[in-house]
Amino acid sequence: MSAAPVVAVVGAGLAGLSCARRLAEAGVSVRVFDKSRGVGGRMATRRLAWTGVDGLAREAAADHGVPAFEAAHPDFAQALRHAAVAGWVRPWAPREPVVGAAAPQWVGAPAMKSWCAALAEGLEVALPHTVTALQTTDDGWALQGADGLLAQGLSAVVLALPPAQAAALLRPHRPGWAAELAAWPMQACWAWMGVSLVPAPDWDQARPAQGPLARLVRQASLPGRSVPPGREIWVAQATPAWSAQHLEQPADAPEALLREAVSAQLGLGPEAWEACWAHRWRYARPVPPPLAPASRGRWDPRTRLGLCGDYLAGDGVEGAWLSGRALADMMLETGVTAPALIAGEA
């Protein structure tokens, strides 16, 4: 008796995991692959470790990807309510230096990646594994990784990746899709994280109108977060224009420039910082306004190849969730168990 057909989802951000969870709930066997050490994609939480000025080792966490998100689509709003009841997300109403209390937003809890982690629970998730190529075989799709074969005999493959990364895998099999995705514009973002020894001001978030900073968030203001006693952790997102200008620089240079900008925003001197880091998101978000594809996901029932991501459904967390769910529904409607043997299409 042959094994049950398996769908591979490449990418463990919210788009990929919402697709995988929907398929699994319908009885489809799913395996998820991601190059990172944890799930979440751009809904990321980074573990920080440093030595304090007192010589003691300390650790904390910082949400250095998506800072927060909102809900407009009714389906996503309903999913958020379910996630809130389960304790995976919580509302956040940050204080701002100019406008006072900002509009309520949502964050994962107790970390930004918590919702993704909950969706991944019970699924087979392979980390960290970078998929370098897709191959067709007599019994379906196979995934090649940097260290060799990752999976074979797959009935379908979902690419929940930034467009440029998906294009590289698609080129031998769907060159038309690959060409479109390779040209799909995405914005980069430098993120900055710093541990301050100075008490925080009376606000939680700033969105400066000028300079390199798009957003500055006090980590302790986010629901469920904790920071070491006597410290504040700040996370900054640089503007798209500034990030593009400094995209290819080694991390030390953007870190120093962003630390200077954050210090100016907070009125702090260089001695206020105990430790600082920078992280480059090469594919942070689709260029607004997003392009308008025919649907929120893309599915080829002949080759059994699918695409999902916020670039197909609208910028941000909501777009990622909508895209993943939409693709899963397309796959379930047309069937995902037939062999995938068509290797090329213009």
Image (cartoon, rainbow, N blue to C red):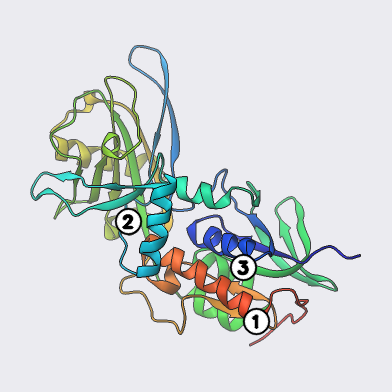
Q: Going 62% across and 80% down the picture, which residue do you hit? A: 333
Between the C-alphas of marks 3 and 1, the distance is 15 Å
Q: Picture coordinates of residue 337 (x, y %)?
A: 74, 74
User: In the figure, is residue 138 to the left or right of 215?
Assistant: right
Mark 3 or mark 1: which is in front?
1
Q: Picture coordinates of residue 22 (x, y %)?
A: 57, 64
Work out whether mark 3 precedes mark 2 in sequence or the reverse, and give the earlier one. 2
- The correct choice, above or below, for 51 with respect to 170 in the image is above
Q: Secondary structure at mark 2?
A: loop
Mark 3 or mark 2: which is in front?
2
Between the C-alphas of marks 1 and 2, the distance is 32 Å
- The correct choice, above or below, for 120 with respect to 180 in the image is above
Q: Amino acid at mark 2?
A: Phe
Q: Count up the numbered dots.
A: 3
Between the C-alphas of marks 3 and 2, the distance is 25 Å
Q: Are marks 3 and 1 in contact (CB under 8 Å)?
A: no
Q: Which mark, by number, is residue 334?
A: 1
User: In the figure, is residue 7 to the left or right of 272?
Assistant: right
- The correct choice, above or below, for 256 with respect to 159 in the image is above
Q: Going 38% across and 42% down the picture, which residue do you hit? A: 63
Residue bearing the label numbered 2: 69
**Circle 2 residues within 10 Å: few <14, some 14–19, many ≥20:** some
Residue bearing the label numbered 3: 158
Q: Amino acid at mark 1?
A: Thr
Q: Secondary structure at mark 1?
A: helix
